[in-house]
Amino acid sequence: MSQTPPAPNANDSGNPVSKASDPEQPDAEANRGAPLEGKSPSSDETAKEPSQSLDNSTPETSEAGQPSPTAAPVPKAASKPVAKAKAAAASKQRPRGEKGVAAKPAAPATTASTGTSVTIQEAPPKSRLRRFIGEILHWTPSWFVSMVVHAAVLLIMAMISIPAPKASTTQQLVVAPGENDAVEEVEDLLQDAPEDINLETDLSPIEVASNVDSSQDISAFDEATAATAVVDLSPIGLEHANQSDLMAAVGALSGSDMSGRGSGKARLVATAGGNEGSEKAVALALQWLAAHQLPDGGWSFDHTKAGGCNNQCRNPGDLPDARSGATALALLPFLGAGQTHREGQYSKNVRAGLYYLITNRMKVSPEGGSFLEKGGNMYSHGLAAICLTEAYAMTRDKVLRAPAQEALNFIVSAQDPVGGGWRYQPRQKGDMSVVGWQLMALKSGFMGYLQVPPVTIQKAVRFLDSVQSNEGANYGYTDPGEGPATTAVGLLCRMYMGWDKDNPALQRGVKWLSDQGPSRTDMYYNYYATQVMRHWEGEEWKKWNSAMRDFLVNSQAKAGHETGSWFFADGHKTDHGGRLYCTSLACMILEVYYRHLPLYRKQTTDENFPLD
């Protein structure tokens, strides 16, 4: 019976050895798990422990299940408790970080079975700065680190993408007053806070006073709010005349042409030929017009559409689609009496009417702001343009400036480029009737310091030359002629374009109109001829005014809902314009005493259209 050899012991290096091969080796069984006394494990011993054999092959056995005597001994790795005990003993023998004890370099570990040596070196100690940074990064939350990194990236990107500011090339024009010029303080120029048109105007039905004292002065227009008396040329600014308009000869240009609509109106009525009866007729006419305003703020030639009328007034017009023309014709008498959207008894009516024209009727294009419409054509546009330019010239409301200028721009673009006139559609060969309304609009804009190109006026002069007869004393419709209405329109245009009182053709033309006298049916002719005679003044005016004033005062309706209105069955275009058309023209004729001051007085002689 063979004896079983003793189990191999693992030495410190992990190599299997027998007791007989190392007589100085103490009994492994006795030392397993026992603490080491009097000697700390060397670095060699500590380094050798991880190098234990990883051979897990199964030893050969005999048939009886015992190990074969010829089989190679199988080393057994030291158990984990033994390794942990050794590590604990080592830490007790030499605490980590002990001062004055130098660490020995690791000795090469030799594997007995293979003869291979493995050298394990300790990592060099870290500097204090690296340990400090490492501790900070270790204990800093990750979200904070991410935030700092992203912030740094954003700052870098911002510095790369934002260009350096460019030097401003804006030039500033500074005009210093002369030595003898008085400097006005800003507080003196802004006595009242500006008040613009509120484009969110309440379009509820307009309330009209049922009882109007026709003897009172209904004017609320303050001439101090009109255009300034002296204007400097400037290429910029809303309060200065632009050099590109008809301002080449400024002279004594002022807003005095409309200043008669203000507080001095009563004096002008008394001195120019008006009376209490004429002013009462104007007050009743304004009341009738206000009562026939539609809820949307506009007017219609078919005045029966007004809610309060209920077909009580006869003679409606047959142009229901020409709302712009009807609204402008209804507003002009209010403006002529000094009523604006800022002040006056009818300020709400005027405000609603202007709002209606600007927001509902004007069509803006590169050619300007158009009021073209079915039935009205360029007639409607000219009337609406006069309305906007007069309202702007009277109030200097900057809200009105752009619409008024756009309306003038369309007139300029619609002019016949060859003949210089205007007709129903843009750039058609002109007729005297349409030309008159467009030139009156350009004149009103000119008085409000809006831009009117001189070339437009030069072309209009060419048209007047083409339809004149009797060397300029008379005018035709589209060709030379002597029509009463066309002659009145032509002479008024010549006055505004600079003909002075010494012009022989103008003298003959005024005498011709005086001989014709006022018409009892044609308010269109009377409207233009009365203005010519008013500007001319003298005995011709007195004769004309006496007949015209008394006829209108006596022919005004004085009963029922028609009170304050006029209608003339055989008049020019009265079937189209109806009672609204006749009432508007008749009312403006009676306002002639203050609606425009005479052109040939000292304060207005330089208000002609400059042609250079």
Image (cartoon, rainbow, N blue to C red):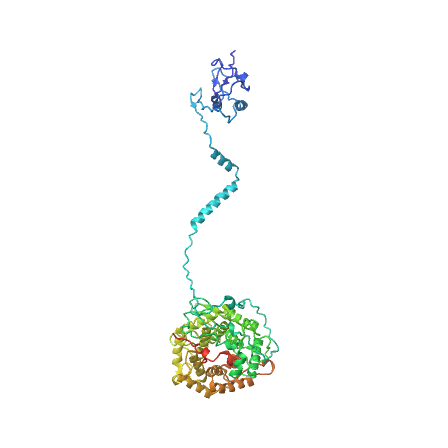
Q: Nearer the viewer, residue 428 or 412?
A: 412
Is residue 323 visible to us here?
A: no
The residue at the far bottom in this view is 515
The residue at the far front in this view is 179
Is residue 350 visible to us here?
A: yes
586 to 87, vertically: above or below: below
247 to 488, vertically: above or below: above
Q: Nearer the viewer, residue 56 or 472?
A: 472
**In the drawing, does residue 266 fall left or right of residue 122?**
right
> Looking at the rendering, which quadrant does residue 236 occupy?
bottom left
> Looking at the rendering, which quadrant does residue 285 occupy?
bottom right
The residue at the far right in this view is 211
Quarter occupied by the C terminus: bottom left
Q: Nearer the viewer, residue 237 or 114?
A: 237
User: Residue 425, how many percent across, how many down?
Assistant: 44, 74
542 to 240, vertically: above or below: below
Q: How many marks?
A: 0
User: Residue 71, how many percent across, how many down?
Assistant: 47, 17
Q: Nearer the viewer, residue 383 or 54?
A: 383
User: Residue 183, how many percent across, how many down?
Assistant: 47, 68
User: Residue 122, how many percent across, how many down?
Assistant: 46, 27
